[in-house]
Amino acid sequence: MNNNQTTPGGEIVIAPEVIEVIIGIAASKVEGVYGMRGDLASNVNQLLGRTAHSKGVYLKNEEDGLRVDLYCYLNYGVAVPKVALDMQEKVKQQVLYMTDINLSEVNIHVVGVVPEKTENPKIDELFDVEEDE
């Protein structure tokens, strides 16, 4: 990706992978986002202990600019439109701040909602056990 800046020393070129990582980190930091959807390779890397910050992020370079599609899971109970708008704003800000590239579109695709974890009931609570004395 070329951010169309010419400096006295030459041209600045930013790899698409760098932009994907910036977007992935910015999107996952938004409150209400459980995680990003990954593919098989990123899921295997995650199992091996490596973090894949670019998972769920897809870039497309078009005539009118750079388009981003984000695929994410949200926490149960959050306002989906509010979280999606927060993600769009945060991603646009971070990419502009770090690379000086304006994104033409940031599309949020909510893949699923992850329910909060509940405690497993104790055996004593499941059965009405009377103790014989």
Image (cartoon, grey):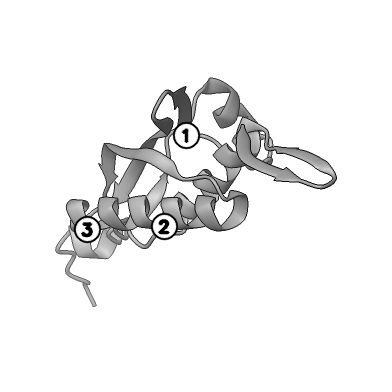
Which percent across, then down, holds residue 17?
Answer: 63, 33
Which percent across, then down, holds residue 3?
Answer: 60, 40
Q: Are marks 3 and 1 in contact (CB under 8 Å)?
A: no
Q: Which mark is residue 57?
A: 1
Residue lying farthest front?
8
Placement of 18 over or under 130, stated as above or below: above
Please tell me whether mark 1 sits on a helix, a strand or a loop. strand
Nearer-the-camera pick, 133 or 48: 48
Tell me the distance, in whole angstroms, between the alpha carbons under discs 3 and 1: 20 Å
Q: Nearer the viewer, mark 2 or mark 1?
A: 2
Residue that numbered label 3 is attached to? 82
Nearer-the-camera pick, 127 or 54: 54
Residue that numbered label 2 is attached to? 90
Q: Left or right of 123: which side holds 35?
A: right
Nearer-the-camera pick, 28 or 75: 28
Please report whichever mark, 3 or 1, sits nearer to the chain's N-terminal start. 1
Q: Quadrant of the C terminus?
A: bottom left
Residue at point 18%, 52% (across, down): 81
Alpha-carbon neighbours of circle 1 within 10 Å: few (<14), some, or many (≥20)?
many
The quadrant in which residue 47 appears is top right
Please tell me whether mark 2 sits on a helix, a strand or a loop. helix
Which percent across, then down, holds residue 125?
Answer: 21, 64
Q: Amino acid at mark 3?
A: Lys
Please tell me whether mark 3 sits on a helix, a strand or a loop. helix
Tell me the distance, in whole angstroms, between the alpha carbons under discs 3 and 2: 12 Å
Q: Left or right of 59: which side holds 47?
A: right
Residue lying farthest right?
9
Q: Amino acid at mark 2?
A: Lys
Q: Amino acid at mark 1?
A: Val
